[in-house]
Amino acid sequence: MSGPKDLDPSSSPRALLGAELRHARERKGLSQSELGEPLFVSGSFIGQLEAGTRRMQLEYAVQIDEILGTGGFLARNCQALAKSKYPDHFAEAAEAEAEAIATAIREYSQLLIPGLLQTKAYAEAVFRAYQPTAPDAKIDDLVAARLERVHLLDDPTTPLLWVILDEAVLRREVGDRTVMAEALRHVSSLARRRRIIVQVLPFTAGAHASMEGSLKLMEFEDAPPLSFVEAPDMGKLLDDPATVARHTLMFSLLQAAALSPQKSLVLIESVAQDYGHGVQHP
């Protein structure tokens, strides 16, 4: 891995805190591992805070201020990072993608089209299902935040996005058939333009390496890789090297079990066409 990259402190509160943390640690003469030890976190975790990959939490900011003698700077300023347009359980992962600039994202989705690939109508249907009594303004804000993430794909090459969709994602009707037709055509369009790589894990694959849930892996130029696991209203970024290695192997096994990108695209477009013609899927 290359040496630490200087962050532009004016680019975001996270960049500001990451830069200040690194400079304060170096002034104190501590390595990342030495700073992490009294906090009971790894050196990699400290490196991710410095690189802007992870959000600074108040409990750590208070302790680091005391260790490094930064006069409460981190604790005072990390409050700005607590404000996010994303749901709490997903905020850290979404911000890692965008603010830390992931170079590669690999995702297996078991139940729905991933947020980076969703259309407005599909996202609205998902949030309506999650929060059926929420006012329109709340749903509009959630949809807007999700669509803002899509700009991560504006660059023609970075990040590499490799998505494996369980066949259930194609067959489960979210919204209505018109919504599904549009959503699947959007996915196929991105694949046709070679902006993403997409595979479908068919029902015929049977038991597979990620039966217990979806999986996301993120790689960065100047920070260790992360994996993200999610459950209802809960999500956790994981940086333990052994865990990330195990999840990377799981994704490789899913790639091997899935249809080829070419065959996957044919299936996605076929199902989209069926939805467009009003065919009901089982």
Image (cartoon, helix red, strand yellow):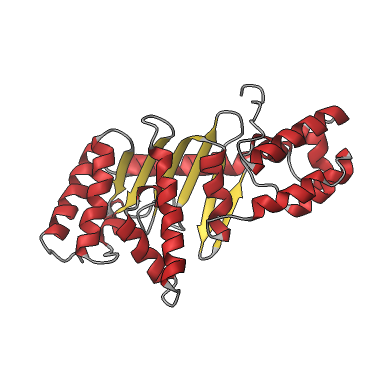
**Looking at this rendering, what residue extends furthest in the top direction?**
2
Q: What x and y, as percent, mark residue 158?
A: 43, 31
Question: Which image quarter is the N terminus in?
Answer: top right
Whether residue 90 sits left or right of residue 197 in the image: it is: right
Whether residue 142 sits left or right of residue 177 in the image: it is: right
Examine the image and state in which quarter residue 44 appears. Answer: top right
Question: Which image quarter is the C terminus in?
Answer: bottom left
Whether residue 107 sits left or right of residue 166 in the image: it is: right
Q: What x and y, as percent, mark residue 277?
A: 10, 60
* 148 or 22: nearer the viewer: 148
Q: What x and y, as percent, mark residue 108?
A: 41, 48
Q: Residue at x 51, y 65 (%)?
A: 232
* 89 or 227: nearer the viewer: 89
Q: What x and y, as percent, mark residue 53?
A: 61, 40
Report whether residue 250 is seen: yes
* 253 or 12: nearer the viewer: 12
Is residue 220 shown above or below 141?
A: above
Is residue 60 shown above or below 123?
A: above
Whether residue 152 sits left or right of residue 181 in the image: it is: right
Q: Which residue is drawn at 32% across and 59% down?
A: 122
Examine the image and state in which quarter residue 36 appears. Answer: top right
Report whether residue 40 is seen: no
Q: Which residue is drawn at 51% across and 42% down?
A: 97
